[in-house]
Amino acid sequence: MARPIAQDDERQTTTAPRRNASVAVIGAGDYIGAAIARRFAREGYIVFAGRRHGDKLAPLVADIEAEGGVCIGRTLDARQEEAITRFIGGADATAPLEVGVFNIGANVNFPLLDTTERVFRKVWELACYSGFLAGREAARCMLGHGSGSIFFTGATASMRGGVGYAAFASAKFGLRAVAQSMARELGPKNIHVAHLVIDAGVDTAWVRERILARSGAEAADRLQPDRLVSPASIAETYWQLHRQPRDSWTHELDIRPYREPW
């Protein structure tokens, strides 16, 4: 019988010796993105973390530095080609870029007739177009180095549309196609491209607030253990994916808790 794993069980909490390699995390939000940044920093990588409001990266930078790691936070509008180029280039100039992670969400829900042209276009820019820019610029660096990993964070909406998700699902479908196309082109050039489908609720304050609003305090308080996937567990999956030997690379990987119906 499988043993349930506690949140901190088998988690590395010390920082490895510094590597001459960088990781760029685009969409380093408070949960998944921050957890990925922490996980790679603990392995000795120099982490470049970018998000729309760079001042919100201060706690992440402080946490990583307190553990002996290096994290450089940058304000980043990933929809701007020049901004992406500077961000990726800055990471590569600091230390050769080894991993690029695109983790921008843009999860919105609007009834079809309330989905304006502006909403549809903005979600596509955030969740698809900026992923293309990030992947292209990461590949430009990695081709020069002869190796690397480029990972895209997907969602349930990457695989199927749903009521109110015309904008979000179409953008995530597009990002999945970008990842597939890149993988077929770059795999033979020793660059591992993967698309990770987060097919579950992530254990964040926002998700718990939604459960509370939808189902009430009793349901929120009685939430079953491991019903939500923790950001640290997701980050561990990204790390293990990067460590895969190249004779058995995974391109697409679903992540969900054992209790998640699918």
Image (cartoon, rainbow, N blue to C red):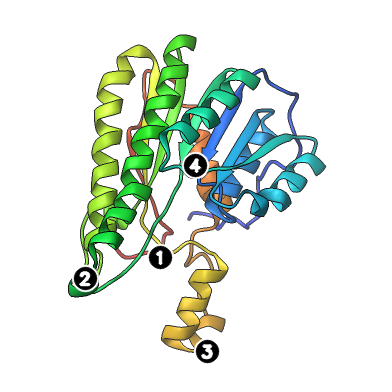
Disc on the earlier residue, 1 or 2: 2
Which residue is labeled 1 in the image? Answer: 259
The kind of residue on which mark 3 rests is Glu
Q: Is residue 165 visible?
A: yes
Residue 86 or residue 182, whichever sits in front: 86
The kind of residue on which mark 1 rests is Arg
> Residue 246: percent from the left, percent from the top?
40, 19
> Residue 191: percent from the left, percent from the top?
40, 20
Q: CA distance from mark 1 to mark 3?
A: 19 Å
Q: Nearer the viewer, mark 2 or mark 3?
A: 2
Which residue is labeled 2 in the image? Answer: 163
* The disc label shown at residue 218, or none: 3
Residue 75 vertical position relative to residue 251 in the rendered view, above or below: below
Disc on the earlier residue, 1 or 3: 3
Drawn side of residue 72 relative to residue 167, left or right: right
> Mark 3: which secondary structure?
helix
Drawn side of residue 184 relative to residue 69, left or right: left
Disc on the earlier residue, 4 or 2: 2
Which residue is labeled 4 in the image? Answer: 237
> Residue 243: percent from the left, percent from the top?
51, 27
Q: CA distance from mark 4 to mark 2?
A: 29 Å
Residue 181 lies in what quarter of the image?
Answer: top left
